[in-house]
Amino acid sequence: VTRIRRPSAQTTAVLQVLSADPAHWRYGYELCTELGIRAGSMYPILMRLADRGLLETSWETEHVPGRPARHLYRLSVAGRDYAAAAAQAAGHQPAPPSRRSPHLEGA
Amino acid sequence: MVLLGLIVLAATLVPHLVRRLRALAASGSDMPERIVVTASRVMTARRDWGLALAAELPQVRGQALRWQFAAGVLRVALFPPARRPERALAVAITGLAVTTALTAATAAVAAPAALFVPLLGLLLSGYAAAVAAGRRPVPPEIPGRITAVLALAAVAASVASVVWLAVWEPASIGGQWHAFSVVLAVIIATHLALALMSPGGRNSSAAAWWALGGAVACAAIYATTAFFQGPEPALVASMGVMLAVGYGASAATGSRLSGARAGLISAVTGALAHFAIDTAVLLTGHQLSAAPGAAGYVIRDAVGGALLTGLLIYPAILAAAALVGSAAAGRRALAPRAQAG
């Protein structure tokens, strides 16, 4: 079991959203709009999770004209364990409500 | 000669800036996009993440949201999260301990340098902690590491010379020394951070060899002319070296940016060596008295001149010369393609 150092509220929210559908790849701005977290906070969270092996990263393989391939994220097996432990430590709070932005395309 | 060098610097940089601004205007990109692209390129320690951030912007709609996103990217680029926070803490504590010990020793034997030493120590400790945390990259190539050792040796020699002057010629660093201490410490730390860059590009190692060669050549030129001929031939010869570094590194990597970076690394590493050599010449060329005297005031002016010329004006001119060299390599590489097209 991954040793838990209590994550911040924002990190816990990111973990909860990612663990809601752990097989599904998400991209950073999608998470920003869904959670209402700004890019300047979201990316450091994703970087730390990836550095600790809690997040798998990949590049989009589908070519969409007009924009470069996006970086995608989902929880690793260790990340799923960590998310479960973090949710437990946070008192089984439900995942925050989705606030999907109307500005997104190709989500 | 320095004036001529400054004219060359202006003549180089102004057309380059005008070309860049025209290219940006023609590209149709807005300001948030320019900020994001520039910030993502700065993230050399986390290159993939820089690309990831740049790839997200096209889907951000609305000027306010784009500005907000660009501000976030800038924040991440300037203050990336630590990869190894525990190691950074250990390095920071060690740096603080070493700085405290050196400050106490300096205060005891060379009171005029008692601000310069701790200030530089804190700046270098902070940078070392950032490197340990993975916030700043370590040069991955062997020549880059040799350049780093050369730059660190030059910094150590400079600090030793300044402290030695404070001991033996107190008047040489009296007067405006506090302001001078701050400026000198900040410039040395900045140059060291630049010297530890990697030139980047697809053949970064070759460019790093060019940078190392340029730095060694400049240091040799400074050492030779400082004792025998005076500064002006040094500037001319070093400009020739920098043209070669910019051209060679750019041709080796196929990137003008890598050529310019290699030139900058050479220029700042050479500048650190230049200052160390100049202060060493001062130490050997004067009868040090360990008491306030006329010689001290002469040396003080010379140290001020070494800072202004060796650490600021020369590297700026030499970096511009490298830029000219890298631009020439870029033009030569593009010419056959243009003809073919």
Image (cartoon, rainbow, N blue to C red):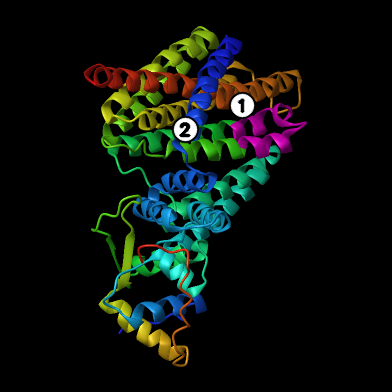
Residue type of the residue flagged with mark 2: Ala
Badge 1: residue crowd in 10 Å (few <14, some 14–19, many ≥20) = many
Q: Chain of mark 1?
A: B
Residue shown at 37%/46% (left/top)?
A: B138
Does B341 appear above or below B33? above
Point out the tag, 1 or 2, that comes first from the N-terminus.
2
Instruction: Give coordinates of residue B246: x percent, y percent.
Output: 37, 23
Residue nearest the viewer, comparing B172 with A104:
A104
- Distance from Cα at disc 1 to Cα at disc 2: 41 Å
State the residue position of label 1: B307
Residue type of the residue flagged with mark 1: Leu
Q: Is residue B182 magenta?
A: yes
Q: Is residue A93 visible?
A: yes
**Magenta part of the protein: which range?**
B162-184
**At numbered mark 1, what does the secondary structure look like: helix, strand or loop?**
helix
State the residue position of label 2: B26
Residue nearest the viewer, comparing B82 with A74:
A74
Q: Is residue A55 visible?
A: no
